[in-house]
Image: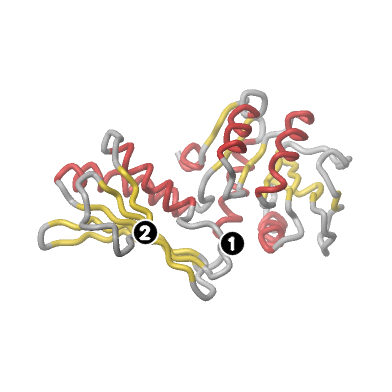
């Protein structure tokens, strides 16, 4: 039985992950970490350093402001981290990479198994269509409370496309009245914010008289929780290093 600490357990995703784990027999939550107490079937500590429970892995659904302390304390306790928090600064990403030399860390812009399958599908489509001159645009849609734009997933999709094409492509993040016509070697990324949209990502391959659309739609946040739990099962016991969801799905 894998023992997990849920960092950021009192939030909405904390409740989602708690419910998912409670229905499984291969993993259990021994403790939560959050500054706010909540009704959870395990003890909640204000910090990882204060946590007295043993564990094999940490799953983090907190916020960017809590990641610095998490990294420091996880390294001290030698605990792997499934890092689900987005919107990290360049300095924080550098700190994540540095910490991964001491503990295993799995970080993904999107924990959904379906989205990570989408990356593979988009890469294959790019090999066929991108190299044939198709223009590639990404449109992402999220709820009106999402602060960062474009989404980390949209950037990750663009990175997959760019890497597949050998690099060197520019990202046009939102077209304004002064942007001019579309330039060769450009990947467009457009963000929509409204209502309660959980998450939609659409990739358009636009050619002469034809368009191919590849889309992923999230209907609830449970898909991110399920992916995080699968990642935790995968990461427990691994050697230090950086891991991704593509390592989980194979």
Residue most toward the left? 209
Residue 167 shown left or right of residue 100 in the figure: left
Q: Position of residue 182 (x, y in %)?
A: 22, 55
Pick the front one: 204 or 24: 204
Q: Position of residue 69 (x, y in %)?
A: 75, 39
Q: Mark 1 = which residue?
A: 222
* Image quarter of residue 49: top right
Q: How many marks?
A: 2
Q: Is residue 98 above or below residue 20?
A: above
Residue 155 shown left or right of residue 44 in the figure: left
Residue 234 shown left or right of residue 215 in the figure: right
Residue 180 shown left or right of residue 5 in the figure: left
Pick the front one: 128 or 67: 67
SS assignment at label 1: helix
Q: Mark 2 = which residue?
A: 174
Closer to the N terminus: mark 1 or mark 2?
2
């Amino acid at each position: 039985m894998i023992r997990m600490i849920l960092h950021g357990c009192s939030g909405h995703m904390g409740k989602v992950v708690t419910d998912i784990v409670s229905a499984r027999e291969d993993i259990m939550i021994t403790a939560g970490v959050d500054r706010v107490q909540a009704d959870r079937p395990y003890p909640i500590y204000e910090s990882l350093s204060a946590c007295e429970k043993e564990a094999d892995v940490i799953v983090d659904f907190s916020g960017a402001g809590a990641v610095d302390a998490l990294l420091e304390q996880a390294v001290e306790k030698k605990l792997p981290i499934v890092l689900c928090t987005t919107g990290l600064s360049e300095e924080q990403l550098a700190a994540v990479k540095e910490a991964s030399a001491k503990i295993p860390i799995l970080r993904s812009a999107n924990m959904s198994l379906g989205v990570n399958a989408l990356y593979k599908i988009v890469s294959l489509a790019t090999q066929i269509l991108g190299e044939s001159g198709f223009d590639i645009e990404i449109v992402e849609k999220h709820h009106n409370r999402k602060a960062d734009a474009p989404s980390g997933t949209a950037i990750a999709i663009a990175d997959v496309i760019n890497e597949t094409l050998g690099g060197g492509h520019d990202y046009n993040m939102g077209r304004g009245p002064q942007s001019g016509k579309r330039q060769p070697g450009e990947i467009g990324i457009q963000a929509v914010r409204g209502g309660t949209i959980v998450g939609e990502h659409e990739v358009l391959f636009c050619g002469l008289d034809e368009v191919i659309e590849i889309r992923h739609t999230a209907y609830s946040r449970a898909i991110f929780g399920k992916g995080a739990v699968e990642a935790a099962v995968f990461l427990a016991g691994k050697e230090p290093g950086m891991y991704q969801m593509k390592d989980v799905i194979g």
